[in-house]
Image (cartoon, rainbow, N blue to C red):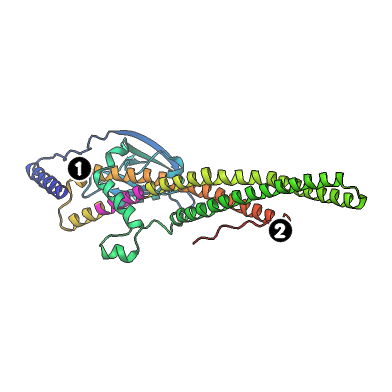
Amino acid sequence: MQGVCNRCFQTIRFQLAKTMFADLDYDIEEDKLGIPTVPGTVTLKKDSQNLIGISIGGGAQYCPCLYIVQVFDNTPAALDGTVAAGDEITGVNGKSVKGKTKVEVAKMIQMVKGEVTIHYNKLQADPKQGKSLDIVLKKVKHRLVENMSSGTADALGLSRAILCNDGLVKRLEELERTAELYKGLTEHTKSLLRAFFELSQTHRAFGDVFSVIGVREPQPAASEAFVKFADAHRNIEKFGIHLLKTIKPMLTDLNTYLNKAIPDTRLTIKKYLDVKFEYLSYCLKVKEMDDEEYSCIALGEPLYRVSTGNYEYRLILRCRQEARTRFAKMRKDVLEKIELLDQKHGEYHCCVQHLEGIRGFRLRAPHSS
């Protein structure tokens, strides 16, 4: 409600300003919201499709500024990294673009072959300025809707913003199940090895007893038999100790996997989700501002923010671009960590198969009730 009142107030103020200065050759001053701009020039080499990789917004007849709406991935503008979303375009190859439409400016850039020089005003925006209460509430909504079914969300009247078929969220649940499975296997293996160690000590005790009996047995044949029994039990004990020494590093590696690798990946996925929801929130905010602008233009009443440079919108565009960069980086980190986990998962299965090949030793997860 407060936002609607502010927009109404701004529109009324704008209409009064137009009326007051209708007969004078004055331009309405840009409302920069305290955001400084720095002029600059960049020369970009076009790609094979004669493009530099930006989309343009603003311009005549409603906005005094022409600005970059989006910088597309893996394009000359993105690879150069000088210009960003929200920056104002002031000229192309030394020619001013003031008073031109975005279509005319796009044609000016398209007509230039090879390299094109863009004159711009760099928006020195602080991302914290764009992270308003509205963005925070949108993040909360996305977090709630993420775990809902489509039917539930539709019944509650909540829109679902989808970036892609994001399987990374499901991997978090898989990690939880894998951690529980391996935790059970670890406890089961420790109990089994403890019992195996005690059994090997029992065999050693048997060996000692048979050895003493063999030494004291007066009959040579019986004495030899007892000595062989003693050696057999002592060999069983030696095999048991060898097996325990073989398995211990495997358990240590599995504990590292459980207590370090999985929690670290789980934390990374949660950070990734937070960045994802923030990016979605800025996308939704841009969509809402676009709809608001189109509605007002259709009524013949341009918005105050549009007619004074659209700095609020450009700030959100910059925040969206930076949020998208963070989102892409976090997604890459998560994919790398999950790939490492998958490799460790495969190594552990090899260890289990190796254990099962050692004279019938069997390692199984405990039955769940």
Query: Is residue 361 in the magenta section?
Result: no
Query: Residue 19's spot in the image, x, y percent?
Result: 7, 45
Q: Please state the horizontal and vertical placement of residue 72, each as a whole percent of the image.
A: 41, 49
Q: Is residue 281 magenta?
A: yes
Q: Which amino acid does the dot numbered 2 rest on?
A: Gly
Q: Residue at x 26, y 49 (%)?
A: 137
- Alpha-carbon distance for marks 2 and 1? 80 Å
The residue drawn where x is 34% and y is 44% is: 85
Of marks 2 and 1, which one's residue comes earlier in the chain? 1
Q: Which residue is mark 1?
A: 308
Identified at 48% across, 43% down, the residue is 264
Counting from the top left corner in percent of width and height, residue 292 is at 21, 54
* 66 sits left or right of 187 in the view: left
Q: Residues within 10 Å of mark 2 (few under 14, many from 20)?
A: few
Are there few (<14), some (14-19), or many (20+) residues within 10 Å of tag 1? many
Residue denoted by label 2: 360
Secondary structure under the numbered disc 1 in the rendered image: loop
Q: Nearer the viewer, residue 60 or 364?
A: 364
Q: Residue at x 21, y 47 (%)?
A: 306
Kind of residue indicated by mark 1 = Thr
Q: Considering only vertical position in the picture, is 36 above or below 308?
A: above
Q: 254 or 314, which lies in front?
A: 254
Q: Could you say where residue 37 lies in the image, as x and y percent from the top left? A: 29, 34
- Residue 321: which quarter of the image? top left
Q: Which residues are magenta?
A: 277-288
Q: Main secondary structure of the magenta part?
A: helix
